[in-house]
Image: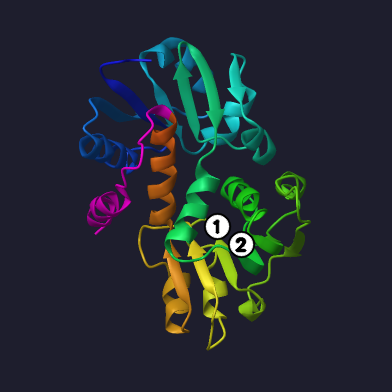
Amino acid sequence: MSEKVLKGAVLGFPIEHSLSPLLHKSAFKLLDIAGDYTAIEVRSGNLEKFLIDQGSDFDYFSLTMPLKEEALELGISIEIDELGQRIQSLNTLVNRDGQWSATSTDGSGFLKSLTNAGYDRFERVLILGAGGTARAVAGALDDISDSVDVMRRSVRRSAAIAACFTKIECEFLDWDDQIDLRNYDLVVNTTPSGAADLVADNLPTRIDAVLFDVLYKPWPTLLARRWSDAGGRTISGLELLLYQGIDQLNLVTPMSDRSIDNELRIVLSKAIG
């Protein structure tokens, strides 16, 4: 790895609207790190070729869709940690003297977002969606929840998300726009923009639970706005973006005890208006 200039990039497609360059460059500045971080378009099926052709020029990569699962099946040597194998999703590649290691900081970023908001334990949790982000969330919830339900649109990914748990056994629910959410103290929305709008339209008039919506632009989402109107607390996906990025950087260059989350939060919040 470079001793003079730390070089990173976020890879994926589409990538032009990614806030990762702003996040990492701002962190470099706050920590007085000489570094550069860019966004590079890498489409599905092209990650292996990119790493072979250009990977040696970088110290680390952030992976976004559609590469988080593709990185698990490359024909080059990558050391994938137990967490990445279990949740079958990777968002971080680190180059250590020419050897790639891989993990996911989505789960740790999710937990730190909750901790920052004052939460460390939940009795009943509902995850909306069963895709890649849901798997990272599931792996993290295994340690801080007593029970987890997953509301899915299809059964295709059920086995993969069930494998993310080692301490509890999740229950699967078929998608129901009129589900009674009063039975949960945390609801995590991992679905794409607009997918949970009908759930928002059918919320009860009073909610005491927490909503963690992994979306952050535009904010608030319809679900988050209706949730707040009903008295519930909401946490934006901007928090997840913030803390997963900090955890990525900490894997590459240990940040000691320096706290930069508040300063970075301001930078990101201004960027999304």
Residue position for label 2: 128
Q: Earlier in the sequence, mark 1 or mark 2?
A: 2
| Residue 13 visible in the picture | no
**Residue appearing at x 50%, y 23% in the figure:** 47
Residue identified by numbered label 1: 191
Q: Amino acid at mark 1?
A: Thr
Element assignment for label 2: strand
Q: Residue furthest bottom?
A: 205
User: Around disc 2, counting alpha carbons within 10 Å, would you say few (fewer than 14), some (14 to 19), or many (20 or more)?
Assistant: many
Q: Quadrant of the N terminus?
A: top left
- Residue 50 lies left or right of residue 189; in this view the side is left
- Identify which residue is drawn at 54% across, 37% down: 104
Does residue 253 belong to the magenta stretch? yes
Q: Are marks 1 and 2 in contact (CB under 8 Å)?
A: yes
At mark 1, the secondary structure is loop
Q: Which region is colored magenta?
A: 252-273
Q: Is residue 93 left or right of residue 3?
A: right
